[in-house]
Amino acid sequence: MEDQQTPTAAEPSPQTQADGAAKTQVDWSEGGATLTLIAINVLIFLAMIIRGVPFLSPTSQDVLGWGADYGPLTLNGQWWRMFASMFLHFGIIHLVFNMLVLANIGIFMESLSGRVSYLVLYFVAGLGGDAASLFWHPTTVSAGASGAIFGLYGGLLGFLLRHRHAIPPETLKPLSKGALTFVGYNILFGLRPGVDMAAHVGGLLTGFVLGVFLVPAPSQQRTSRYSQNVIALALGAALVLWPLRALPKPGDIIGEFSQLEATEDVSLKLYNDSLEKWKAHQLSAGQFADVIDKQILPKWKAQRDAVANLQRLPPDQTKLTARLVKYMTARDEAWTLLVESLRENDPQKLTRALAKMREADLLASSAGAGK
């Protein structure tokens, strides 16, 4: 039994110290929500693998089908993607690293703030990251728990801003180390093309704002925080409604490019097969011309117009779209000249058609199209 000391005016009572320490030390028995979040993330990833999603490096299209955040879909009514994307990851490395960090900071923050406030902080910060992503990179496919995890660190910073000495240094030291590792990894990972750092910053800032008033002081009773949770949930609702109502809806570049690839495959296969039949005298010049004019060109022109009409794209995607439209126009002109040469038996137009086809092939190579 420890010796009992009489508290003085300059010292808090042992009961007060115990109450404060109880909320500033990691309590693993209060980590149920964190462990549940980790389990859900892992189970969803396993389900993705079972359904054929690559284990190490899934593509944007792979994750998009499972609910990743993507402006052209999210801003056109599929708002649920802002939630679903928090549980999706781009491969096993992305998942494992995020879950390890979540176990580190999550259980501490859950112990500090209480289960309900912790879940509110986690999800609202994640929505803040998604909203930032939709604002800055609306045509980027984003997924992962990183925005929400950044929000937990932001919440801790917001808490420390008001209660600077509430957490002992020995408790903060491992959390600080984990934070530096997490931030460093995400900075390096964020240097890869297509990685959305806006979601990380948005989650961090949202978590910081919530941490200022949502995470309680050691002396505050958890049962008295109903109003803070309601305000935080209102913020979360605003973070969903604001992008849906205020942000412009970008063109679905992924959808149109996928459709273009399918149209190109079908069109070039039909053209090449018909060309071989014409050379083998299995098709007349008029029949070959009809195949191009009636079966190939209408779908090709419609797809080119769809790509050309994509709006509100970032500069790099706008340039790529322009190159593809130029390629498709050259292919269109080549086939049109070929149809005219076949119907008119005009060698000069045939020569021009062949030159235009070579030009189209070069444009296809520079634009990443063509077979």
Image: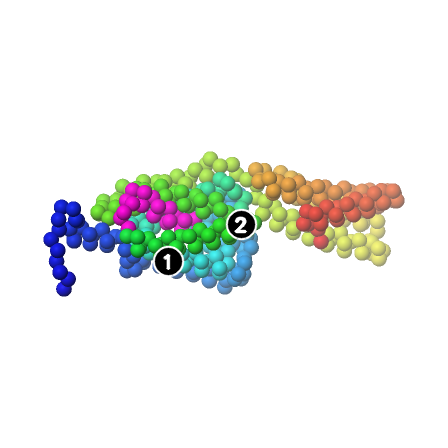
**Left/right of residue 7 with respect to residue 357 in the rendered view:** left
Q: Nearer the viewer, mark 2 or mark 1?
A: 2
Nearest the camera: 291 or 239?
239
Mark yes or no: residue 31 visible. Answer: yes
Nearest the camera: 180 or 279?
180
**Left/right of residue 250 with respect to residue 226 in the rendered view:** right
When asked about the image quadrant of residue 324, the answer is: top right
Q: How many marks?
A: 2
Q: Secondary structure at mark 2?
A: loop
- Mark 2 is surrounded, within 10 Å at the Cα level, by few (under 14), some (14 to 19) or many (20 or more) other residues, namely few
When asked about the image quadrant of residue 328, the answer is: top right
> Split into 4 quadrants, where in the image is the N terminus?
bottom left
> Magenta part mainly helix, strand or loop?
helix
| Magenta segment | 145-167
- Asked if the residues shown at circle 2 and circle 1 are in contact, with their CB atoms under 8 angstroms apart, the answer is no
Mark linked to residue 103: 1
Residue 162 part of the magenta-drawn span? yes
Measured from the top left, where is residue 93 in percent x and y? 49, 59
**Left/right of residue 152 with respect to residue 340 in the rendered view:** left
At 53% across and 50% down in the image, what residue appears?
191
Q: Sequence order check: which comes first, mark 2 or mark 1?
A: 1
Q: Which residue is mark 2?
A: 191
Q: Amino acid at mark 1?
A: Ala
Q: Secondary structure at mark 1?
A: helix
Q: CA distance from mark 2 to mark 1?
A: 25 Å
Mark yes or no: residue 301 visible. Answer: no
**Left/right of residue 303 with respect to residue 179 in the rendered view:** right
Measured from the top left, where is residue 69 in percent x and y? 49, 48
Q: Amino acid at mark 2?
A: Leu
At 37% across and 49% down in the image, what residue appears?
152
